[in-house]
Each structure stands twice: as C-alpha cells, then as structure tokens.
C-alpha cells in the first residue's frame, strides 16, 4: 500500500476557492452494510445534472463477485442501496473501473534499450517478446536445530523477455594519432575497439513505454517479503523509432577524449535512419543532466570537464560555461544555447514544460567553490536554489535564491507552530503550478536520510512562490501535525490549486497511521493570498476530539458544482460508518 501510495504524492488540481475561508456546508454519516464493509470501493462518481452521488463497492467471494451500488442525494441522504452478483465480463460492460477481457495472452513483440555493465556500459538495443506463465502457490518447510519454518508463497504471473535479436551500435573513431607506432598490435586493437563503443546518455522511443517485472520472484524468510533479483525494465512496442544519445570515450596514455552523438533507429529492424554528431564544443564537456520531454525530444545540459579529464589541451577557463542542447525526435540538434551558470555545481531536479514550449529548470546549487568544475564537487554544501527559464531559443532568466533569502520571506499559518526555513538541502521536490498572474509555484517536502542511510524521514512541506522573472516572492511552510512513524516514513499527499480571485488553496492530508493496508488520512486546508503573501489559519475536516473519519485512499477529494465545492468522503477507523463533508470554496 505504501508503495502504491507514493504515486499519489504531490497531485495538483486547478480548482477555484474562497478568499481566506473554507465553509463546511454539510457533514453527514451513514451506516455501511455488511457487504460494503467487507468489500473495496470501486468507484465514486457525482452526477452534476441529477445532483447525486453513486458509490460502488466490490466484494470478492469464492464463487462470485458482489457489486453493491449506493446512490445518495446532494446532502448525502441515502436514495437506494442495491447488490448484484456479476461475472467479470458482465461487470466490465457495466462499470468503467473493471478492466477485463477474454482475449488470450499473445506474446507482444517489444524493444528495450539497455546500458550494458550495470548501466555504465555501451548501448544495446534488444528486440524480443514478453511471455508469461502462471506460477502456482507453493509451500516450503525449513527445519533447523531450534525451530521449523513453513513459508507459503502465493501464485503469480511470471513474465519473461525472450530476446530475438540485439544491436550494439558502434561508430568508427580515428585513434591513429593517439597511439605510438611502436605500440603492440593488441594495444592498437584494444584502443580502436574502445573508441567504437557508444555509452548510453539518454534515449527515447516513439511508442509509450511500460515497465514490466521479469524474472523469478523470491521469498525472504528473514524479511518476510518477496523480491526479484532483476530490476523492473521499460519496454516499448516494436514499432516507430528509437533515438539514442551516446558518448564515445578514448582513455589511453596521455589522452582522454570524448564526443557525443545522436542516433535514430527503426524499432522494427534496428536499421539506422539518422546520425548526428553533437559538435561545436571548444573544450571538453560532459552531460550533467538529461531528460526526455513530452514532445519526444531529449534535453541535455553540459558542463566543462576538469583538467584531469581533458587530455591533451586545456580545460575551459570558465567552469560555469554550461550548454543546453535539445535533440528532436529525428536525432537532430534542434536547439543549442550557451549560458553562464551562476553556480558551478547545479544538481538539476527536473525540467518542467508548458504548452507554449517554455522550459523551466531548477534544483539546488552551490557557489562556494565557483572556481571548481562540476565533476570535482562530490559532496557540495548547497547554498542556493537555481532556477532557469528557456523560451524562444534563449535563456529568459536564470536566478539564484540563497538560504538567507528564503528565511527572510518565510510565511506560515498563524495557528501553526514555528517552522524552520528551507536550507537548500534534504527536500523531495513535488510539482510545479503556474498561476494566471504568471507566478510559478514549486513545492516539496523535507526528506532527511536516517542514520542507516536507506531510511528517509519526511517532515515539513514547503511552497515557493516565484514571480514571472524567476525571483522569489514568498516561502510558505506547513508543519506536520502527525509525527508518528507511518506519517514520517512516507511522503504526504498535498495539493495546491488556484482560485479565480488570485488566491490559492493549499490542501494537506495528514497521516494518522496505517490500519490493515489503509492509510488513515484526514484533510487540512489553508488559503494563501498570493498578492500580499498572507496565509490563513489551517482548517481541519473529519477529525476532532470527539470523532475521527479518514478519507478514502483512492478518492481523497471529489470536486463538484463546476469545481466550486469539494467533497471529502471516507469512513471511521473500523470501516463501519460512511462520512461525507461538502466544503464551499467559492464566493
């Protein structure tokens, strides 16, 4: 449940709201039937014309599946409650949330792009089929000196990738001038083979990718969990095209030479359709960030290499001379922008895109060693958040917000305890929201690594408001009310949505715990006046000193009435009582 829950983190909705207040218009509870209690919620829909809510609960039994449908009016009064037994085929025709068909599994032909040698080696394009087989439930008994352990593993579908053919791209690269004529023949051959290899930087496929877990599943009696030895891998249909951005490297004797190339292949037969050498670098560079964009282009950012990685010759005298390059879906260089980064160390988090083609790039950065090169700074102490916008084939702005600037513009709800300002570290960034005024909102949650290294403790939630010029206007902080282990061991769901009057609603789902794979969440909400950078008190829904109701994990919020109102829906801790709340968020 916790892994599935991560998918919901930082969802943003574009909804209206009320200036500095949230009005609880209606709150009501209904008893759940025994069938509904034992089932799972399949869907929750609102009919705007009829002003009715429809909930469908699904209960699996040994020989049949029961679907219970509850219909309620606008104020959550029960109109009808009916149950019926349906086959999967019947249910799939009646309900959108039931995804089932009788077609037999046909091994699909797929392709995948690998980097050999654990992701650090040369590129390999693989074509094959995905087959599946049902692994029956098994039970194993282990007898030791002191105890007997019986391990039961449930049945599951095992997926296998069956390779048909493979291509390892290679490009000739002259090394005659790099090797002494007196060098042995095997040395020359070794360097020539090394120079031909293409090391993976980034790739893109035309077809939508799907991640599939292949290989055998293992059960660990010590951890009491199942695991796979092979990682999940992305596969695409064997049609369309594949674009690969690769790197060639020659490291021999006194030489360290690298160059980059973009290649396009047909996915059906791996025939080469285009090859573009990414040239124009006066000094040695390396790609410090890459990302595939929604239009199937590949964005790359390059930084200068230090002296020990530039042989012969000298490194770029300016360690902050960065280059942005955009490779289109035909493997051509679409854009090339050279710019000076304010920080020599910039760990980019992501590139956000807009329908207008604008690119927003941001991440923590450090200016403490601006005379050092990117590759020389392994454990930097970040001192700013660097933010860049690219529009119309040029840098529209590039700004840095220092730690002390964040502290000066800190705002928090008046009924909340003091919150530490963001210190440019230990933040798990979320989504970006663009307001109608041109402001840009970036959110994130504090995520500190534990003493064991693999544990993360989640804490404060931050919202940064930047103006259209990329300068910080305000920082807003939210301190978690729930600090139990379940609340701090996973990200907190939160959403930010703009209102028509220019204010912003900020919704946070506090985690009171986990009960039988259900995350016990309740909503807290505040309003932000983006013009004056004022934030309202936090309002809590569902939980009070007398009672506690927790929202449904799959439907934590349902907007109604042209997005002017929100409906929260859930149950009590024992799943016996339905709870509904309607909150007005418009004038």
Image: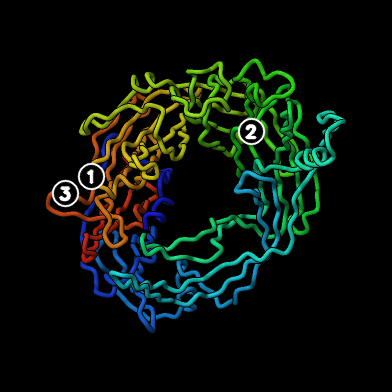
x, y percent for residue 461: 34, 37
Left of 262 or right of it: where is 449?
A: left
Crowd around label 2: few <14 · some 14–19 · many ≥20 (10 Å): some
Query: Which is more N-terminal, label 1 or label 2?
Result: 2
The CA span between labels 3 and 1 is: 8 Å
Residue underneath mark 1: 540
Q: Nearer the viewer, residue 327 or 166?
A: 166
Q: CA distance from mark 2 to mark 1?
A: 47 Å
Instruction: Tell me the residue at 61%/46% (across/down).
Output: 119
Point out residue 140 in the picture as x, y percentages from the top left corner.
Answer: 40, 75
Locate the C terminus and report the quarter of the image it occupies: top left
Instruction: Mark 1: give few (<14), some (14-19) or many (20+) Cα within 10 Å.
Output: some
* Between marks 2 and 1 in the image, the one whose residue lies nearer the viewer: 2
Depth check, mark 2 against mark 3: the one in front is: 2
Asked if the residues shown at circle 3 and circle 1 are in contact, with their CB atoms under 8 angstroms apart, the answer is: yes
Which label sits on residue 174? none
Residue 36 appears left or right of 296: left
Residue beneath disc 3: 544
Question: Relative to 280, is 200 on the left or the right?
Answer: left
| Residue indicated by mark 2 | 287
């Amino acid at each position: 449940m916790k892994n599935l829950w991560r998918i919901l983190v930082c969802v943003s909705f574009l909804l209206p709201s009320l200036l500095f207040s949230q009005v609880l218009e209606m709150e009501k509870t209904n008893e759940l039937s025994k069938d509904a209690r034992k089932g799972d919620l399949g869907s929750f829909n609102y009919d705007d014309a009829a002003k009715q809510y429809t909930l469908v609960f699904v209960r699996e039994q040994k020989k049949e599946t029961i679907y219970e449908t509850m219909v309620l009016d606008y104020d959550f009064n029960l109109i009808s409650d009916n149950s019926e037994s349906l086959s999967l085929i019947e249910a799939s025709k009646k309900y959108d949330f039931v995804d089932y068909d009788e077609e037999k599994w046909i091994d699909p032909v797929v392709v995948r792009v690998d980097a050999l040698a654990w992701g650090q080696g040369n590129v390999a394009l693989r074509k094959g089929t995905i087959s599946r087989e049902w692994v029956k439930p098994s039970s194993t008994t282990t007898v030791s000196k002191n105890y007997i352990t019986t391990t039961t593993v449930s049945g599951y579908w095992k997926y296998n990738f069956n390779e048909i053919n493979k291509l390892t791209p290679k490009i000739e690269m002259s090394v005659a001038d790099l090797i002494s004529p007196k060098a042995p023949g095997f040395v020359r051959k070794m360097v020539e083979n090394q120079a031909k290899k293409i090391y993976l930087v980034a790739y893109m496929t035309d077809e939508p990718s799907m991640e599939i877990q292949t290989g055998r599943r293992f059960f660990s009696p010590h951890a009491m969990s199942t695991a796979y030895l092979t990682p999940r891998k992305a596969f695409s249909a064997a049609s369309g095209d594949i674009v690969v951005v690769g790197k060639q490297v020659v490291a021999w004797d006194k030489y360290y030479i690298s160059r980059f190339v973009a290649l396009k292949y047909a996915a059906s037969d791996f025939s080469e359709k285009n090859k573009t050498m990414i040239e124009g670098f006066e000094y040695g560079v390396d790609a410090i960030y890459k990302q595939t964009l929604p239009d199937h282009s590949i964005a790359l950012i390059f930084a200068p290499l230090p002296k020990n990685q530039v042989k012969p010759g000298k490194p770029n005298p300016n360690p902050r001379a960065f280059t942005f390059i955009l490779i289109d879906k035909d493997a051509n260089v679409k854009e090339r922008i050279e710019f000076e980064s304010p920080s020599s160390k910039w760990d980019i988090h992501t590139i956000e895109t807009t329908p207008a083609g604008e690119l927003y790039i941001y991440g923590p950065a450090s200016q403490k060693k601006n005379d050092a090169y990117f590759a020389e700074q392994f454990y930097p102490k970040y001192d700013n958040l660097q933010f860049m916008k690219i529009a119309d084939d040029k840098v529209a702005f590039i700004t840095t917000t220092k730690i002390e600037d964040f502290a000066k513009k800190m705002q928090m709800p008046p009924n909340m305890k003091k919150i530490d300002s963001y210190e440019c570290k230990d933040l798990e960034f979320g989504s970006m929201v663009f307001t109608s005024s041109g402001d840009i909102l970036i959110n994130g949650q504090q995520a500190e690594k534990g003493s064991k290294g693999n544990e993360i403790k989640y804490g404060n939630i931050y919202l940064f408001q930047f103006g259209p010029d990329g300068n910080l206007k305000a920082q807003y902080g939210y301190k978690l009310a729930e600090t139990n282990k379940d609340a701090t061991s996973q990200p907190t769901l939160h959403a930010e949505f703009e209102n028509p009057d220019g204010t912003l609603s900020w919704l946070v789902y506090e985690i009171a715990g986990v009960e039988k794979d259900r995350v016990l969440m309740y909503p807290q909400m505040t309003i932000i006046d983006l013009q004056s950078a004022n934030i309202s008190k936090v309002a809590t829904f569902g939980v009070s000193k007398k009672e506690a109701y927790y929202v449904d994990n799959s439907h934590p919020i349902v907007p109604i009435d042209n997005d002017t109102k929100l409906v929260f829906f859930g149950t009590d801790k024992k799943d016996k009582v339905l709870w509904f709340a309607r909150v007005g968020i418009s004038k």
